[in-house]
Image (spheres, grey):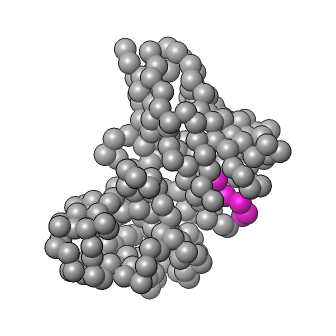
Amino acid sequence: QQPVQSPQAVILREGEDAVINCSSSKALYSVHWYRQKHGEAPVFLMILLKGGEQKGHDKISASFNEKKQQSSLYLTASQLSYSGTYFCGTIKAAGNKLTFGGGTRVLVKP
Amino acid sequence: DAGVIQSPRHEVTEMGQEVTLRCKPISGHDYLFWYRQTMMRGLELLIYFNNNVPIDDSGMPEDRFSAKMPNASFSTLKIQPSEPRDSAVYFCASSPLTDLAFGSGTRLTVV
């Protein structure tokens, strides 16, 4: 079952913050986050394996609430390079398939 | 490492023709995935392999689609016969069980 992402789109000014949410109706083993620029392939950002775990990639960080089956991606002090579509992907058990959400389009303006 | 290599980058074919997409995964990655991306349906998993063995093909749309992985360094996705609704970007990705590395994709247009 596909995870649900929100919002579907967000427009930011450079330096502003944003949060992207990803939720699942099933228990999760791990959550992945990827970013895709227009016309390119998705690129891995980070993976979260444990409940409550937080990770960071530059000024992009994420949390995973295992009990709520939710993950959030935080874009802090956004840069123009953060523009793109962000996908969360969820895995229900180790070695199982990665299912992606519908994506969140992020546009960072000068 | 050259990353995941897909070919061709673009394919335009007529309805009814056979189409074969190719993928070379990153050496040492035990998992290989085929995804299809469209505006309407997003990123859909079609099939994935573990150590060259198909594990889950529940995402393959219908019998017109087939995928093989004859060895650890090569996989194909075949559509026969192709239809206009198959038009999409097809991504191959490989993984050592953690993060996925995607190829550049094949943009398929069926006219």
Instruction: Relative to A2, say whether A81 is above or below.
Output: above
Task: Tell whether position A92 is magenta.
Answer: yes
Instruction: Relative to A15, say whether B35 is above or below.
Output: below
Secondary structure mostly seen in the magenta stretch:
loop
Tell me if I can see residue B30 in this picture: yes
Tell me if I can see residue B27 in this picture: no
Task: Tell whether position A30 is magenta.
Answer: no
Please give left or right for residue B81 compared with residue A22 in the image: left
Q: Position of residue B22 (x, y in %)?
A: 33, 72
Residue at 37 percent of width and 50 percent of height: B39
Instruction: Specify the farthest residue to the right.
Output: A67
Instruction: Relative to A87, say whether B11 is above or below.
Output: below
Please give left or right for residue A13 compared with residue B78 in the image: right
Please give left or right for residue A76 compared with residue B80 in the image: right
Q: Position of residue A89 (x, y in %)?
A: 59, 51
Quadrant housing the N terminus of chain B: bottom left
Q: Position of residue A3 (x, y in %)?
A: 62, 50
Asked which quadrant contains residue A51, the reply is top right
Residue at 27 percent of width and 59 percent of height: B107
In magenta, the rendered stretch is A90-94
Instruction: Relative to A105, say whether B77 is above or below.
Output: below
Depth check, front residue: B4 or B48? B48
Please give left or right for residue A48 compared with residue A9 in the image: right
Quadrant housing the C terminus of chain B: bottom left
Residue at 37 percent of width and 55 percent of height: B38
Depth check, front residue: B30 or B89? B89
Residue at 43 percent of width and 79 percent of height: B62
